[in-house]
């Protein structure tokens, strides 16, 4: 049977909005993670058959096919093509799926999948402004969609509240989870658990100082549960606050996906095999519920149960998403986002999927766990889910 292996996984440390990565061109960040994959694997750059990158806001510096501009900012030869995909917050998880599907189909042997987002340079939702007509809540919704969903904004903030309400996630649980995310991220950083995945970035700060960016900038080193509890919710009577939302972040990540044949030919060391993939759509007005049916579907396809999963990453787009997921699936809080998540480390939209593939792979290997699961909620209700299997 054909196999698709993850042979390397790298990421930049997350940069806070207007922070250390904010002056880096997104294509330079993309080129940097591609080069890190090439350097670490020693694979022949000309043998890479495609680069599939995720990016959500494909305008300004992120336009004109960011995968290709990243290739042209890397050591890959011009013969390597590239394509940029938008599956919203799961874009680079989808990039990994597309790469794996090409390899499993026998159509390609070596594909780099990854993603980039500079949320400082291209703010979230900025692509929405170009087509806005007066009175139109959501410029992406045409007449038929507006007739079907009258007055709907499809807002992720509303979705986060709705998901909390539907699954009975409380304010106390959200506050504790936000706090735990920072504690776990700090502990992981101090223990060097991100050292395999991180690629240092040499950056010039606004005052002209040169520095190395190699630590996630969003972590609160002394998180304060009382301060989290005291934050004003974003909406009146709401549960969602700045602490339990994912942070606005700049970053890039990439993985190498290889066939069995490429592993042998290039002497690669597989870290995990892509065991099962799923992608689903769910109610777009709930926006963020997709990881639940996505996980149900991927487990069913794999013939496995949630208890078979040794560790899981469910993106902390908002704290209510993984907590609702945990309740619905009967999953174990102690196996969920064990090194912190987007509440502490940030959520550089297009880069998050392949970033979390890497974090999951390295944690499965540290824990000697056979299976790991990744699920990400995506705008308008879609979700990707992936089961990885550790390879010795
Ligand atoms: C929620 C959101 C609007 C908050 O934006 P913001 O107000 O600029 O948020 P910040 O992170 O700068 O935090 C503002 C303040 O809240 C307080 N705060 C935030 N997190 C805190 C925490 N964990 N503990 C204590 N105080 C905290 C601080 O006072 C902070 O100011 P400081 O960083 O100068 O200390 C923004 O992060 C956001 O849009 N997130 C979601 C992004 C998104 O939709 N992604 C896609 C998912 S579907």
Image (cartoon, rainbow, N blue to C red):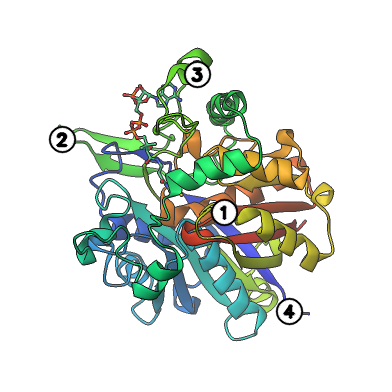
Comparing labels 3 and 4, the label whose residue is closer to the camera: 3
| Label 1 CB sits under 8 Å from any ligand 1 atom | no
Q: Quick check: marks 2 and 3 in contact, CB under 8 Å?
A: no
| Residue 199 in view (yes/no) | no
Looking at the picture, tell me which residue is in the foreground, 378 or 39.
378
Where residue 324 sits, quadrant-wise, is top right
x, y (%) of residue 262?
63, 76
Res 48 label: none
| Up/down of 109 relative to 120, above or below | below
Say few, some or many: other residues with alpha carbon within 10 Å of mark 1 (under 14 / 14 to 19 / 20 or more).
many
Which residue was labeled with disc 2?
A: 208
Q: Earlier in the sequence, mark 2 or mark 3?
A: 2
| Up/down of 161 relative to 349, above or below | above
Comparing labels 1 and 2, the label whose residue is closer to the camera: 1
Q: Earlier in the sequence, mark 1 or mark 2?
A: 2
Q: Quadrant of ligand 1?
A: top left
Which residue was labeled with disc 4?
A: 2
Q: Earlier in the sequence, mark 1 or mark 4?
A: 4
x, y (%) of residue 130?
21, 64
| Up/down of 238 relative to 160, above or below | above
Say few, some or many: other residues with alpha carbon within 10 Å of mark 2 (under 14 / 14 to 19 / 20 or more).
few
Q: CA distance from mark 2 to mark 4?
A: 51 Å
Q: CA distance from mark 1 to mark 4?
A: 26 Å
Comparing labels 2 and 3, the label whose residue is closer to the camera: 3
Tell me if 231 is positioned left or right of 321 in this view.
left
Which residue was labeled with disc 1?
A: 376
- Residue depicted at x 54% and y 44%: 162
Which residue was labeled with disc 3?
A: 229
């Amino acid at each position: 049977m054909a196999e698709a292996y993850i042979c390397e996984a790298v990421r930049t440390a997350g940069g806070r909005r207007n922070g250390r990565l904010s002056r880096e061109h997104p294509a330079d960040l993309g080129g940097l993670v591609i080069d890190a994959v090439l350097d670490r694997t020693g694979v022949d750059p000309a043998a890479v058959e495609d680069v599939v990158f995720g990016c959500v806001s494909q305008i300004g510096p992120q336009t004109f096919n960011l995968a290709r501009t990243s290739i042209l900012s890397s050591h890959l030869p011009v013969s390597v093509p590239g394509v940029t995909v938008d599956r919203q917050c799961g874009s680079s998880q989808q990039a990994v799926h597309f790469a794996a599907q090409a390899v499993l189909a026998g159509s390609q042997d070596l594909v780099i999948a990854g993603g980039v987002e500079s949320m400082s340079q291209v703010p979230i939702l900025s692509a929405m402004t170009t087509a806005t007509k007066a009175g139109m809540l959501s410029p992406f919704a045409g007449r038929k969609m507006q007739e079907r969903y009258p007055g709907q904004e499809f807002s992720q903030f509303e979705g986060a509240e709705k998901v909390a309400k539907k699954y009975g996630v409380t304010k106390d649980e959200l506050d504790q989870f936000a706090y735990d995310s920072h504690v776990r991220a700090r502990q992981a950083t101090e223990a060097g658990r991100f050292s395999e995945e991180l690629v240092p970035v040499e950056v010039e700060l606004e005052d002209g100082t040169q520095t190395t960016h190699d630590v996630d900038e969003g972590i609160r080193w002394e998180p304060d549960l009382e301060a989290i509890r005291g934050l004003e919710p974003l909406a009146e009577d709401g549960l969602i606050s700045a602490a339990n939302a994912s942070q606005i972040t700049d970053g890039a990540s990439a993985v190498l996906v290889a066939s069995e044949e490429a592993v042998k030919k290039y002497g690669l060391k597989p870290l995990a095999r892509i065991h099962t993939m799923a992608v689903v759509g769910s109610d777009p007005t709930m926006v963020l519920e997709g990881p639940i049916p996505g996980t149900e579907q991927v487990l069913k396809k794999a013939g496995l149960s949630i208890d078979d999963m040794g560790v899981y990453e469910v993106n902390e787009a908002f704290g209510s998403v993984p907590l609702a997921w945990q309740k619905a699936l009967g999953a174990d809080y102690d196996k969920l986002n064990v090194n912190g998540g987007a509440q502490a480390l940030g959520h550089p939209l297009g880069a998050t999927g392949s970033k979390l593939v890497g974090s999951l792979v390295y944690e499965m290997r540290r824990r000697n766990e056979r299976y790991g699961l990744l699920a990400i909620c995506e705008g308008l209700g879609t979700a990707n889910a992936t089961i990885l299997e550790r390879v010795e």
